[in-house]
Image (tube, helix red, strand yellow):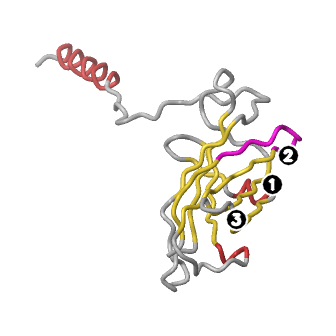
Amino acid sequence: MTATIRSLLALFSLFVLAGCQPVPVNPRPRIAEPPPGVMPDRAALTVQPPVDTDQNKHADTVGVIVYLFPKPNEYAMPIWTHGSYRFVLTSSVDGTEMAVWSYDPDQTADARFRTEIGPCYMFQLRLADVGVSDEFERRACELRAVFTPTDGGTPVDGRISYQLGG
């Protein structure tokens, strides 16, 4: 091969290699940040099955994930914002208040988490942490989460029902 042909092949190879770029597998879409001043309008809760963390054969802890959503016309995804949470567990049978957990703004900030859905808050609500026994018959319960923004905005709440005890 002549020097000219080798030079052309080398140049061609360089162009081919320079044009090859790896294609990401399952690239994550980039989600736009919420506009400034967007405040939560509603809360959505999910709960994990209650578990027995103290090994006494009674479920005593429930994992809770809370998503805060602004008005749909302002931003479609859940958001984080500064504030506090209050959780109230009541018996669905007679409305009796069973337990209350409160989280100040610093504790709430520490509970920030991100799932596939988006920004959320993750809490482990343990009955013993608020002085409540876990030894009671299985019953339907309702958990209400109230988020109060630090800046004095309107509190928002969400509710979910599940079985506890037994």
Majority SS type along the magenta span: loop
Give neighbour class at mark 1: few <14, some 14-19, many 20+ (Cα, 10 Å): some
Which region shows up in magenta? 149-158
Q: Do callouts 1 and 3 mark residues in contact (Cβ within 8 Å)?
A: no
Looking at the image, do the residues carrying marks 2 and 3 touch, with CB atoms under 8 Å apart?
no
Q: Report x, y in % for residue 34.
A: 68, 29
Asked which quadrant contains residue 157, the reply is top right
The amino acid at mark 2 is Thr
The vertical placement of 78 against 96, above or below, is: above
The three-letter amino acid code for the residue at tag 1 is Pro
Determine the residue positioned at 84% across, 38% down. 153
- The x, y position of residue 33, in whole percent, is 65, 30
Q: Nearer the viewer, mark 2 or mark 3?
A: 3
Nearer the observer: mark 1 or 3; the answer is: 3
In depth, the one of 27 and 129 nearer the eye is 129
Q: Measured along the vertical axis of the image, is residue 121 above or below residue 41?
A: below
Please tell me whether mark 1 sits on a helix, a strand or a loop.
helix
Q: Residue at x 79, y 29 (%)?
A: 37
Q: Amino acid at mark 3?
A: Thr
Q: Which residue is mark 2?
A: 150
Q: In the structure shown, which secondary structural element does the residue marked by tag 2 occupy?
A: loop
Label 3: which residue? Answer: 96
Instruction: Give the Cα distance between marks 2 and 3.
Output: 29 Å
